[in-house]
């Protein structure tokens, strides 16, 4: 449907009205506008004040001719009747006299007149097109300012009835101003078919029916007995301190499958037993680590020290700890009363001996922060003598040593950690020894598919995860409708990265590993 500018409409109507009074069929053929449209424009113009009409050149000449034989009184009456000032009429007469007084050679020929009319039509078409584009741009700009992210994003979003009605009103207003419906919907972040569906049905009267919809219980939903068993198992004394993320793998190791981890969480939440516990804040998402890549134990270590408060105000003990990033096993630790580089050197020597670093062709990388103890000269000399490559966190980056920092958080927020402080050094060392034993042999680590660090360090994780996968496959065969896709991922974690910057870094390390294995 074509749209015309206001100036074009006024020029067309002026030709239809006196004094020119051109035939409507002739104007329709010349302008390419239907007769019905011209009649509507003329009817609208007759209802407007006469001073708003536009006088074309032909109409002005006709007015000069019609008033030429009139006296002053008659001419004044004519001007009042047609909404023209006498000064305007005199100006039209002077312009016509000046044009007729030109020399014949200065006047346009018939060929020039035809070319000028053709050029005028082209310019008018171009003007109409630009006026249409300008009107659409203006309407879309105004529409974009109305939508400031108020509507929810994404497919299947639920939009309230009030927001629907307001959105349709804004879209209709933009279309009246010259915007195309599809472009207006794109600016509003809506699909045109969605708005059309609202208008065709009751979408603008009743709103979204999903909140009031009656949904039948799925045939594969957990039964009341199964939900009760989940509660009973989760509240057993041995699972009293554990979340569903660790209960489910431990049951799988025992050859028992009751429900998935999400089902455990959903049932506990429904019964009000999913409250956050402990002094730690609720977990938050953090960016994944990498820079160094580990594909086996004894390739990448990270270490740090942390303060252990004593019962004497201002007195601290220092826990030195080395963690294998691939297996998450604590391979070395010590607790001392002072912070000294000599303690760090002794820990490095004992850890390297216990892990058999001297027998490895590829020595491990030891990553730490930029603390004075970690960068002391004696520490660097020991690392050089052991063949271990040192690595340090980037300046002003606080989470480059995230693995060991997460380990310290786990240690200090366990229920067994004495919040009042340690009585003496022996008490701190006893607690540290018990924690390391629990962490290495009993703790199911979420970063390595919920196996213990000692099992992964020894290479037993693949066998354990294979058993879990077989158990889940059997459970899926028993209740196939409870799985819409695949079962839980029990694939062993092949690579562990420390502070990944680019995926190409990981790919290059894996390629080097394959080349080394092929050469061997």
Image: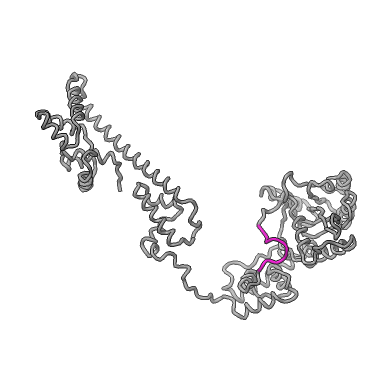
Left or right: where 216 falls relative to 123: right
- Start and end of the magenta stretch? 275-284
Res 32 → quadrant:
top left
Q: Is residue 20 visible?
A: no
Tell me residue 117's x, y (percent). 24, 32
Res 88 → quadrant:
top left
Q: Nearer the viewer, residue 520 or 339?
A: 339
**Residue appearing at x 89%, y 56% in the figure:** 336
Left or right: where 476 falls relative to 336: left
Left or right: where 34 falls relative to 375: left
Q: Is residue 488 magenta?
A: no
Vertical position of residue 471 compared to residue 380: above or below: below
Tell me residue 230's x, y (percent). 66, 76
Tell me residue 184's x, y (percent). 41, 50
Tell me residue 411's x, y (percent). 78, 61
Mark count: 0
**Residue appearing at x 59%, y 79% in the figure:** 223
Q: Nearer the viewer, residue 462 or 326?
A: 326
Q: Is residue 163 visible?
A: yes
**Residue appearing at x 17%, y 23% in the figure:** 97
Q: Residue furthest bottom?
A: 225
Image coloring type: one colour
Q: Is residue 282 magenta?
A: yes
Q: Nearer the viewer, residue 406 or 63?
A: 63
Q: Residue furthest front?
A: 73
Q: Main secondary structure of the magenta part?
A: loop
Left or right: where 254 falls relative to 385: left
């Amino acid at each position: 449907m074509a749209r015309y500018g206001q100036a074009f409409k006024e020029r067309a109507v002026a030709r239809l009205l006196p004094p020119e009074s051109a035939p409507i069929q002739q104007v329709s053929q010349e302008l390419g506008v239907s007769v019905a449209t011209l009649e509507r424009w003329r009817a609208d113009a007759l209802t407007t004040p006469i001073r708003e009409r536009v006088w074309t050149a032909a109409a002005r000449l006709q007015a000069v001719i019609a008033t030429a034989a009139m006296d002053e009184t008659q001419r004044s009456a004519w001007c009042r009747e047609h909404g023209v000032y006498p000064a305007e009429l005199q100006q039209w007469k002077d312009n016509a006299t000046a044009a007729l007084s030109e020399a014949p050679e200065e006047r346009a020929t018939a060929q020039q007149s035809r070319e000028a009319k053709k050029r005028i039509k082209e310019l008018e078409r171009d003007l109409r097109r630009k006026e249409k584009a300008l009107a659409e741009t203006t309407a879309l700009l105004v529409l974009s300012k109305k939508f400031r992210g108020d509507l929810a994003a994404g497919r299947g979003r639920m939009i309230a009835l009030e927001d629907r009605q307001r959105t349709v009103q804004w879209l209709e207003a933009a279309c009246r101003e010259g915007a195309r419906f599809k472009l207006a919907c794109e600016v509003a972040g809506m699909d045109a078919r969605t708005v059309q569906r609202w208008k065709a049905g009751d979408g603008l009267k009743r709103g979204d029916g999903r909140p009031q919809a009656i949904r039948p219980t799925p045939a594969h939903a957990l039964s009341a007995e199964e939900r009760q068993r989940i509660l009973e198992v989760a509240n057993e004394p041995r699972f009293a301190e554990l979340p569903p993320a660790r209960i489910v793998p431990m049951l799988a190791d025992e050859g028992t499958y009751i429900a998935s981890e999400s089902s455990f969480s959903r049932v506990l939440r429904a019964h009000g037993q999913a409250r956050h516990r402990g002094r730690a804040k609720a977990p938050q998402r953090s960016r994944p680590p990498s820079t160094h890549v580990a594909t086996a134990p004894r390739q990448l270590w990270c270490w740090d020290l942390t303060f252990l408060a004593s019962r004497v105000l201002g007195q601290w003990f220092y826990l030195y700890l080395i963690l294998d990033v691939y297996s998450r096993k604590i391979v070395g630790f010590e607790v001392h009363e002072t912070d000294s580089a000599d303690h760090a050197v002794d820990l490095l020597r004992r850890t390297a001996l216990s892990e058999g670093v001297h027998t490895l062709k590829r020595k491990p990388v030891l990553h730490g922060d930029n603390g004075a103890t970690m960068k002391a000269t004696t520490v660097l000399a020991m690392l050089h003598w052991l063949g271990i490559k040192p690595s340090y966190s980037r300046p002003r980056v606080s989470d480059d040593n995230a693995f060991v920092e997460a380990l310290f958080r786990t240690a200090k927020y366990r229920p067994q950690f004495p919040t009042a402080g340690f009585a003496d050094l022996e008490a701190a060392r006893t607690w540290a020894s018990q924690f390391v034993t629990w962490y290495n042999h009993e703790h199911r680590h979420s970063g390595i598919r919920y196996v213990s660090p000692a099992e992964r360090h020894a290479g037993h994780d693949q066998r354990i995860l294979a058993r879990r996968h077989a158990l889940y496959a059997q459970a899926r065969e028993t209740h196939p409708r409870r799985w819409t896709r695949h079962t839980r991922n029990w694939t062993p974690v092949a690579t562990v990265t420390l502070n990944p910057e680019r995926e190409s870094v990981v790919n290059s390390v894996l390629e080097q590993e394959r080349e080394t294995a092929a050469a061997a």
